[in-house]
Amino acid sequence: MSVPSSQAGLRSRITSLLPTRADLDQMRRHPRRNLLAGLTVAVVALPLALGFGVSSGLGAEAGLATAVVAGALAAVFGGSNLQVSGPTGAMTVVLVPIVADHGPGGVLTVGLMAGVILVGLALLRAGGSMRYVPAPVVEGFTLGIACVIGLQQIPNALGVPAPDGERVLVVAWQAGREFVRAPNWTALALALSVAAVMLLGARWKPTVPFSVLAVIAATVVAQAAGLDGARPIGDLPPGLPAPSFSFVDTAALGSLLAPALAVAALAALESLLSASVADGMTVGGRHDPDRELFGQGLANIAAPLFGGVPATGAIARTAVNVRTGATSRLASLTHAAVLAVIVFAAAPLVSRIPLAALAGVLLATAVRMVEVGSLRAMTRATRSDALILVLTAAATLVLDLVQAVVIGLAVAAVLALGAVARQARLAPLPLDRGDHTEEEHALLAEHIVAYRIDGPLFFAAAHRFLLELTELADVRVVVLRMSHVSVVDATGALVLKDAVEKLRRRGILVLASGIRPEHHRPLASVGALELLRHEGGEYATTPEAIAAARARLEHDGLLRGTAAPRATAVPAPTREAP
């Protein structure tokens, strides 16, 4: 029995997304170099995984589970040889309101659903869409994320209980008021010290994992001095829980679909952006965007089964991976394996880390996320770029990340359409080709107006075109040269048809030349092409259309008259027609 072509195509598509022998061969090269890189990334990732797990609301163990499970699966099945995946600050920003509305089980269900969506996007070959996201939108939401992450750490950095609420500005303000009423200088000192060590140390020796050193020092000081204000993480389970679907509530799936779409969109965007950054840091590096979505989808399907939060590619950890010499997936796998060892063997030690120290790690991470040079370049590029960046950052801070990206993309699209529409113009076409006498030119200028339509004839520019064209006065023939039209949509075709009809009702003959074959369909669908072809009104070249116009006027006896009307709306032609 033959397999239907659709099933064969799906099987072929899935096969193209799976790991290949080339991946294994590459992992066998430079093993020591990649093992060392993976160990370094694990050391850097440990405090981040703990911190983002706590910030998400599911606890430090959720962050560790995500880093181990999702990190391993994304390393094997992802589309980048250098990508490191796990919990990230951007995802934490989205998860906090989901925890507030639906509880921990809702977050796990959202992660599972988002993973399925990502796999579906990979099968639909949606990975290439990342290149259409404008750079100001990316910079804007990165800036907004950094601000949100920093504000989320205020309660732990001040050593006060986290106030209720979803808006980080409100929560941070309330935490500040609580600190003023009952100051916890111990927590504040630990958070600021860890952040300062990380920021200053990174400028001094970028290759040293100062985050881990600072957290260890803060933990030792807090334990040795018995500091009451240094509240620890608390007990952690010794290992990963057994995989389970018990968190899934089928009755809540409908209400969780919108958050799942938001999480999937963010995971796709951040992972593909991180993979692109890794490509730019290497010579000849190139990721497979569809396979990256597939790997992230599998990672997010598996992570919730072990109590992990949704994961994405992590730009900071990926950059560390590349800078420390990683060349294959072995480094990312090593990172996950080292964290797994820590989960199983060092959980009691990790549980003593002060929450204020993790808050300091994330405060420093938020500061390092802001690339001042990139922001300055974007704001100086054009006013449109500056507006998109500021709006996206503000929407991220006030609303949420997905809404911010949608707003940024919408504003960018509107501004881009406006710019494209301004490029569309209706220009007088000079008729002098060197084969007419001066008397003939004067006669043509008095009876015929030739216009060249430049750029797109679409909804954003079509109505301006209609106004310009129908304002002609005292003209007998209008020749429209359309060889320079780049795009025609239904709106543009309708407007063109309307303009031709209005001109003909005034007794003005409209001829067209150079209509491209790909424009025939939209013009024909609304009847514009048939109208232009009426009485032989479509010509292959402009000279043919001009000759036809002269012949028509001669037939009507206008060219022999002495009192011919003048085309007052258009200046006399001065140069040769292309």
Image: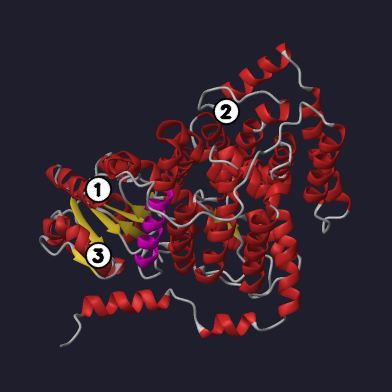
**Disc 3 residue crowd, few under 14, some 14–19, many 20+, Cα 10 Å:** many
Name the amino acid, label 1. Answer: Thr
Taking the spot 66% from the left edge, 38% from the top edge, the residue there is: 234
Q: Which mark is residue 491?
A: 1
Pointers 3 and 1 in contact (CB under 8 A)? no
Taking the spot 28% from the left edge, 39% from the top edge, the residue there is: 471
Asked whether 554 falls inside the magenta stretch, the response is: no
Q: Quadrant of the N terminus?
A: bottom left
Which is nearer the eye, 251 or 121? 251
* Residue range highlighted in magenta: 111-125
Sequence-wise first label, 3 or 1: 1
Q: Position of residue 7 (x, y in %)?
A: 24, 76
Taking the spot 46% from the left edge, 31% from the top edge, the residue there is: 100
Pointers 3 and 2 in contact (CB under 8 A)? no
Sequence-wise first label, 1 or 2: 2
**Disc 1 residue crowd, few under 14, some 14–19, many 20+, Cα 10 Å:** some
| Residue matched to label 2 | 168
Q: Position of residue 574 (x, y in %)?
A: 45, 56
Sequence-wise first label, 3 or 2: 2
Q: Position of residue 334 (x, y in %)?
A: 66, 68
Taking the spot 76% from the left edge, 26% from the top edge, the residue there is: 229
Q: Position of residue 543 (x, y in %)?
A: 30, 68
Q: Nearer the viewer, mark 3 or mark 2?
A: 2
Using residue 427 as the reference point, say whether residue 196 is left or right of it: right
Using residue 249 as the reference point, say whether residue 171 is left or right of it: right
Circle 1 sits in a helix, a strand or a loop, which is it? helix
